[in-house]
Image (spheres, helix red, strand yellow):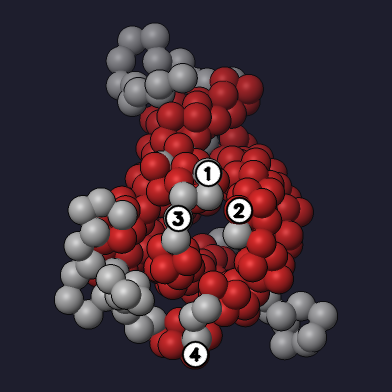
């Protein structure tokens, strides 16, 4: 379902109902979420090499490492203690709590990177990350810093669609790349974390978008987040699939 911007000031641009706004937001995912990107399709069909998976794990790490920073920015902007308590969970989910019981999503992603054959220390240092990855991820930080709190929260709503992609990804990685099976703890944790986070965020957006104009800003913020995720995969595809031109200083696939 294609979802196009609506002139919220036009006649007839009435406030969307709760269900109507949810449908619009979900429509953005159907149209723009990165589950449809050719790089992901190749992954799920078992057509990526170990080197291409290494490039993906490395570049995706930069995104993962910035997520708790993004959430800390949103947390700092929340004027309500109940909001801050709820959002604080996200930071802990990714950073961990300093105990062996909850090592956090960033460490789990490093274990996935290690399973591909990368050195976790080098991944954590960001060595070889594509410039386009940095630009795209840094733009996500710009969104949550510079736009309204409503838009910042709405930008997180790609989590509405992530559980299905994660379930499919785990199945296909185990099927096509069994040597990765020991590094999938990140995805296993997100199967429960992401739906919980998405439920809180969509309720917040629906309750706090008081005008049609605000509803449209929330929808656009989600579009922009989907574009950021898509752009990261565009960069990977260009550098490591077709035409296969990694820029100077970027990770090089062994033997390429």
Q: Residue at x 37, y 53 (%)?
A: 233
Distance of mark 4 from mark 1, alpha carbons?
A: 30 Å
Q: Which numbered tag is attached to residue 45?
A: 1
Q: Is residue 150 left or right of residue 173?
A: left
Q: Earlier in the sequence, mark 2 or mark 1?
A: 1
Return the x and y of residue 130 as percentages of the image width and height: 29, 69
Q: Is residue 27 above or below residue 68?
A: above
Would you say 226 lies left or right of 72 here?
left
Residues under numbered marks 2 and 1 in contact, where contact means CB atoms less than 8 Å apart: yes
Among numbered discs 3 and 4, the one appearing first in the sequence: 3
- Seen at 56% across and 61% down, the residue is 78
**SS class, disc 3:** loop
Q: Which residue is mark 4?
A: 121
Q: Which residue is mark 2?
A: 176
Q: How many marks?
A: 4
Label whose residue precedes the other's in the sequence (4 or 2): 4
207 versus 17 height, above or below: below
> As displayed, is residue 121 above or below residue 225?
below
- The structure residue drawn at horizontal position 24% and vertical position 59%, both measured from the top left corner, is 244
Q: Residues within 10 Å of mark 4 (few under 14, many from 20)?
A: few
Residue 104 falls in image quadrant? bottom right
Does the image show residue 58? yes
Q: Position of residue 102 (x, y in %)?
A: 76, 78
3 or 2: tag closer to the N-terminus: 3
> Badge 3 is on which residue?
48
Mark 2 nearby-residue class (10 Å; few <14, some 14–19, many ≥20): some
Q: Residue furthest front?
A: 255
Could you tell me how far apart the alpha carbons at marks 4 and 2 are, in whole angstroms? 26 Å
Task: Give the side of residue 58 with respect to residue 153, left or right.
Answer: left
Residue lying furthest top: 12
Determine the image quadrant of residue 236: bottom left
């Amino acid at each position: 379902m294609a979802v196009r911007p609506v002139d919220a000031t036009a006649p007839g641009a009435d406030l969307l109902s709760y269900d109507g706004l949810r449908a619009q937001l979900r429509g953005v995912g159907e149209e723009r979420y990165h589950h449809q990107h050719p790089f992901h399709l190749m992954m799920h069909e078992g057509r990526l090499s170990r080197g291409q998976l290494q490039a993906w794990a490395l570049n995706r790490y930069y995104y993962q490492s910035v997520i708790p920073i993004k959430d800390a920015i949103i947390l700092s902007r929340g004027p309500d203690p109940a909001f801050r308590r709820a959002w604080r969970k996200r930071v802990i989910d990714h950073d961990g709590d300093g105990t062996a019981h909850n090592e956090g999503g960033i460490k789990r992603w490093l274990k996935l990177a290690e399973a591909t054959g990368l050195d976790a220390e080098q991944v954590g240092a960001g060595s070889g990350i594509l410039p386009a990855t940095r630009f795209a991820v840094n733009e996500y930080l710009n969104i949550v810093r510079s736009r309204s709190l409503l838009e910042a929260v709405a930008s997180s709503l790609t989590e509405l669609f992530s559980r299905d992609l994660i379930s499919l990804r785990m199945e296909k990685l185990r099927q096509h790349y069994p040597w990765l099976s020991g590094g999938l703890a990140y995805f296993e944790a997100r199967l429960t974390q992401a739906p919980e986070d998405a439920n809180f965020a969509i309720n917040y957006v629906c309750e706090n978008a008081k005008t049609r104009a605000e509803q449209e800003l929330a929808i656009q913020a989600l579009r922009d987040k989907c574009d950021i995720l898509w752009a990261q995969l565009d960069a990977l595809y260009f550098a490591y699939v077709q035409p296969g031109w990694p820029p100077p200083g970027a990770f090089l696939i062994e033997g390429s």
